[in-house]
Image (spheres, helix red, strand yellow):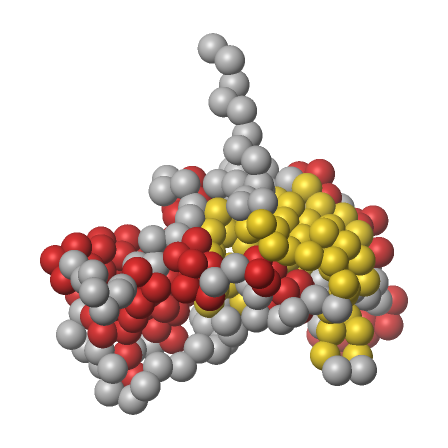
Amino acid sequence: MSPIPARPPRLTGEALHAGYEARPVLDGVDLAVPEGKLTVLLGPNGSGKSTLLKTLARTLTPDAGRVLLDGQDIHRRDTREVARRLGILPQGPSAPEGLTVRQLVDMGRFPHRRLWRQDAGRDARIVREAMAAAGVTDFAERSVDALSGGQRQRCWIAMVLAQETDLILLDEPTTFLDLRVQVDLLELLVSLAHDRGRTLLVVLHDLNLAAAYADVLVMMRDGRILRQGPPGEVFSADNLKKVFDLDANVIHEPRTGSPVCVPTQSGRVRSRREALRGVGA
């Protein structure tokens, strides 16, 4: 049986230069977001991860270069049309006080509504399906304010799913969440890509979680992409040193084979530990 050919990327950035007022950040970035995969942007603080995500999402206009969505310049397309094709979950989103989960998820239907053409039955069905996919059906009538951090993030993901877009961009969705909740959330994102055919681009900080769950890693430093590819190829001690200036060993998890970063202790720390062991002997 012949392998299924890869789908051409629908979202690409070409020679992107972008920043904030007098502070340039991106320095000629080229990125084609792989279809049907979970791609993770990694890099130290200030490397340009969030700036690249915002530029691809049309939240930030590039100073040079262009972003193409389905072959057309995203900054020359109608906002509502873009929202039907591309979903964005920014870092730390907030909902109006007292909003229920169902009401929040229903907001994802806005790009599809017209004053002269509305289908309440279809909207309600899609909202139910989005809540089920994100695992928040049981919270439908509860206030978003009353939920835990992980539950709220799932609600926001459900809202994006209600947009019926195959492209989803998320900026640090696991920040401030407990490890177990982070794992649950990343497993949801993986299932959206692998089981539902969504294309996801996610900014993460945790190196080992990124290596464990990403299909593609994009490593950035100083506004440029230094390495990109499958975790097994790019998550190496040499690349961690080049990108993060981190001295580490990379081992492989026995069951899955995923690469794991183990930072190397400095000589001073090792000497102190040895001294403490000697005191306790």
- Return the residue nearer the eye: 146 or 264: 146
Residue in the picture at 47% in, 10% down: 1
Q: Is residue 112 left or right of residue 187?
A: left
Confirm whether residue 33 shows in the render. Answer: no
Q: Position of residue 34 (x, y in %)?
A: 58, 42
Residue appearing at x 37%, y 62% in the figure: 160
Q: Toward which corner of the image does residue 147 lie, by quadrant?
A: bottom left
Left or right of 48? Residue 55 is left
Residue at image position (64%, 40%) is 230
Task: Report the residue that reaches farthest toward the left.
Answer: 121
Q: Which residue is drawn at the image coordinates 34% and 73% (left, top)?
A: 152
Location of residue 253 with respect to 16 vertically, above or below: above
Q: Nearer the viewer, residue 275 or 279?
A: 275
For residue 281, which quarter of the picture? bottom right
Q: Position of residue 32 (x, y in %)?
A: 64, 46
The residue lying toward the viewer, choosing from 272 and 140, is 140
Would residue 173 be found to the left or right of residue 60 on screen?
Answer: left
- Quarter of the image for residue 102 reads bottom left
Say if 182 sits above or below 37 in the image: below
88 left or right, relative to 195: right
Residue 17 in the image: x percent, y percent? 77, 64
